[in-house]
Amino acid sequence: MKVAREVAMVDSFEAFVTARTPALVRYEFVLSGDRHDAADLAQEALARLGARWARVSAKGDPEAYVRTTMARLHISWWRRRRREHPTGSVPERGYEDEGIARADGDAGLWRAVRALPTRQRVVLVLRYYESMSDEEIARRLGITRGTVRSQAARGLDKLRADTGVRTQEPVTRR
């Protein structure tokens, strides 16, 4: 019994779509002024109607539902397009960051930095990549200045060992 009722509903939805689609596309064409947009919006509105056919057809006026849906969809599409600002030419120059270029140049170093424990890695990146002082790093991380220095020293020692750099460069105090 339920299957027969669903088949009857599908047939009636299909009959509605077949009978009313040309009029609905014309209605949307009047709204949008573009036949392709009209067809797209009509199809979207009918798809939404199909998902709610039983409830909408029980109320007795599925065409009013579809026309209201189409008008609302048209307004949404119009708002979305209004925010777009197409230009005649795309700018050819991209954004270049010197720091990123430096970092990309030495993959072995960054692999070694990623292998460091988190706190050592953060301290070294803040000190050497972001050029922060020990006091700024301590404030940012909520640790003491002595902890910043010890983590930096341990991290540098580990980097020197991992990258094969044997010379000990003096660490500048900040």
Image (cartoon, helix red, strand yellow):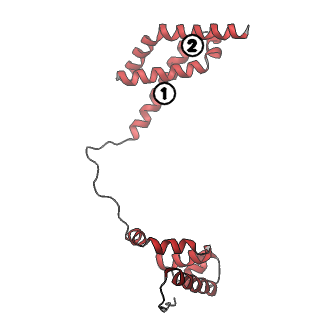
Q: Is residue 93 above or below residue 60?
A: below
Foreground: 155 or 145?
A: 155
Residue at (45, 70) in percent of width and height: 107
How far apart in space, not on screen, are marks 2 and 1 (Cα)? 16 Å
Q: Is residue 124 above or below residue 167?
A: above
Q: Residues within 10 Å of mark 1 (few under 14, many from 20)?
A: some
| Residue position for label 1 | 73
Pick the quarter of the image with the N terminus: top right
| Residue position for label 2 | 62
Residue at (54, 14) in percent of width and height: 64
User: Which quarter of the figure has residue 136?
Assistant: bottom right
Residue 7: which numbered mark, if any?
none
Q: Position of residue 62 (x, y in %)?
A: 57, 13
User: Which quarter of the figure has residue 104?
Assistant: bottom left
Residue at (60, 21) in percent of width and height: 51
Mark 1 residue type: Leu
Secondary element under disc 1, as helix, strand or loop, is: helix
Q: Quick check: 44 left or right of 82? A: right
Secondary element under disc 2, as helix, strand or loop, is: helix
Residue at (35, 21) in percent of width and height: 35
Evaluate whether residue 22 shows in this view: yes
Evaluate whether residue 130 shows in this view: no
Q: Position of residue 127 (x, y in %)?
A: 51, 80
Q: Position of residue 45 (x, y in %)?
A: 51, 21
Q: Is residue 63 above or below residue 96?
A: above
Mark 2 residue type: Pro
